[in-house]
Image (spheres, helix red, strand yellow):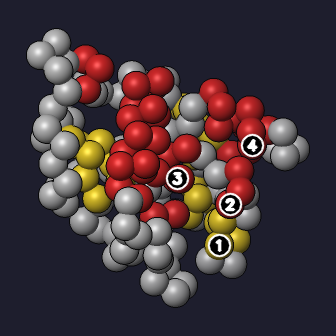
Amino acid sequence: MRCPPGCHLCCLNTRMPLTRGDVKRITSLGYDPGEFAVRDERGILRLRNVGGRCYFLRDGRCSIYESRPLGCRAYPVVWDPERGACVKDPECPGELEAGEFVEMCAMALRVVEELGLGPTPSAWRGGPPSRRRTPGRSRRAP
């Protein structure tokens, strides 16, 4: 993934969900979940925003980049339940490298399935939906 220099739009007003693995990885760095996470109305743990920015955004960069949440690793590829497909978030100005889309989609689906955030290919009885790669309106959940 190539982000434009200085871009951190994805870290502003984030609602990035956290898996158990994410929380474990981040707490192993010495952070307390009460510092960096909040529960949403559905009880899903999400990254905390401080002043409209991700808790871990420091000087325009992720302070836990090597240990960042799975959804952050998958971004800008998100699962769009209306399309039944992964899409690149159209709000992201970054460019995907060749071959990254499929890998990032797999990560996004792991987050969605683990947290029960919506119907995914495993929920389809007739097999997985098409693998359309057309960017479109997304729900911004990985």
Q: Residue at x 52, y 87 (%)?
A: 5
Q: Residue at x 87, y 44 (%)?
A: 30
**Amino acid type of disc 3?**
Cys
Q: CA distance from mark 4 to mark 3?
A: 13 Å
Residue 9 appears in the rendering: no
Q: CA distance from mark 4 to mark 1?
A: 16 Å
Label 4 close to label 1 by CB (< 8 Å): no
Residue 4, image x, y percentages:
45, 83
Which image quadrant: the C terminus?
top left
Q: Which residue is mark 1?
A: 61
Q: Which residue is mark 4?
A: 26
Q: CA distance from mark 2 to mark 1?
A: 8 Å
Mark 2 vs 3, N-terminal side: 2
Q: Nearer the viewer, mark 2 or mark 1?
A: 2
Quarter of the rendering containing residue 75: bottom left
The total number of labels drawn is 4
Label 2 close to label 1 by CB (< 8 Å): yes
Q: Dot 1 lies on which element?
A: strand
Q: Dot 2 lies on which element?
A: helix
Label 2 close to label 3 by CB (< 8 Å): no
Mark 4 vs 1, N-terminal side: 4
**Amino acid type of disc 4?**
Ile
The crowding category of the residue bearing disc 2, from other C-alpha atoms within 10 Å (few below 14, some 14 to 19, many at least 20), is: few
The crowding category of the residue bearing disc 3, from other C-alpha atoms within 10 Å (few below 14, some 14 to 19, many at least 20), is: many
Q: Which residue is mark 3?
A: 72
